[in-house]
Amino acid sequence: MSRMGAGIHHLYKRKRFHQLPGEKLQEYPHPDKWINRLDKLLLIIAAVGPIMNIPQAIHIFALKNASGVSLISFSSFAFFDIFWLIYGIVHKEKPIIIAYALWFITNLVVVAGIIMYG
């Protein structure tokens, strides 16, 4: 499962380094209005994406039933979120840190529900 955070690193790298001599990165904010809006949209998607796991968790806990929800999938998602979170911390990229911390938490909540009610 691909996450939106990968594109955010490019955005902030562009923001920090577009003025260095020899760098061929685009300006930030980008002068093209469409690209500028796309940059902003991706920041929103990075925050909203993890919230999409909440209905799954509510469904599991409200019905006390996790049949049909894959423990392997959600455990794997949580496991891989750890590496993205470490990546964000190492590169000091707040959007990646926030997004993957939220993904990790929501995936763990679903995993807990599957273990309890699966």
Image (tube, grey):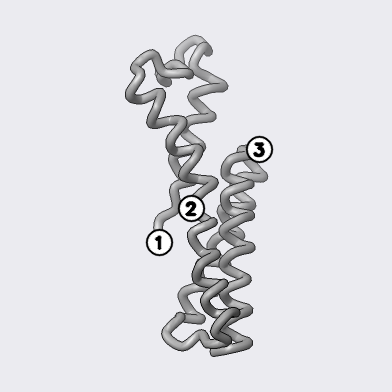
Helix, strand or loop at mark 1: loop
Q: Amino acid at mark 1?
A: Met
Q: Amino acid at mark 3?
A: Lys
Which residue is drawn at the image coordinates 51% and 67% (left, top)? 55
Question: Given this view, does label 1 or label 3 mark the residue nearer the observer?
Answer: 1
In contact (CB < 8 Å): disc 2 and disc 3: no
Q: Amino acid at mark 2?
A: Gly
Circle 3: is it few (<14), some (14-19), or many (20+) Cα within 10 Å?
A: few
Helix, strand or loop at mark 2: helix
Q: In 3D space, how far apart are the residues under numbered discs 2 and 3 (Cα atoms)?
A: 20 Å
The image shows residue 35, relative to residue 108, as above or below, that is above
Question: Given this view, does label 2 or label 3 mark the residue nearer the observer?
Answer: 2
Q: In 3D space, how far apart are the residues under numbered discs 1 and 2 (Cα atoms)?
A: 12 Å
Which residue is drawn at the image coordinates 46% and 33% (left, top)? 10
The image shows residue 80, relative to residue 32, as above or below, that is below
Which residue is drawn at the image coordinates 58% and 89% (left, top)? 117
Nearest the camera: 26 or 20? 26
Q: Position of residue 76 (x, y in %)?
A: 51, 71
In contact (CB < 8 Å): disc 1 and disc 3: no
Circle 2: is it few (<14), some (14-19), or many (20+) Cα within 10 Å?
A: some
Residue corresponding to mark 2: 49
The quarter of the picture where residue 69 lies is: bottom left
Mark 1 or mark 3, earlier in chain: 1
The quarter of the picture where residue 1 lies is: bottom left
Helix, strand or loop at mark 3: loop
Q: Which mark is residue 92?
A: 3
Mark 2 or mark 3, earlier in chain: 2
Q: In 3D space, how far apart are the residues under numbered discs 1 and 3 (Cα atoms)?
A: 23 Å
The image shows residue 83, relative to residue 40, as above or below, that is below
Q: Which mark is residue 72?
A: none
Residue corresponding to mark 1: 1
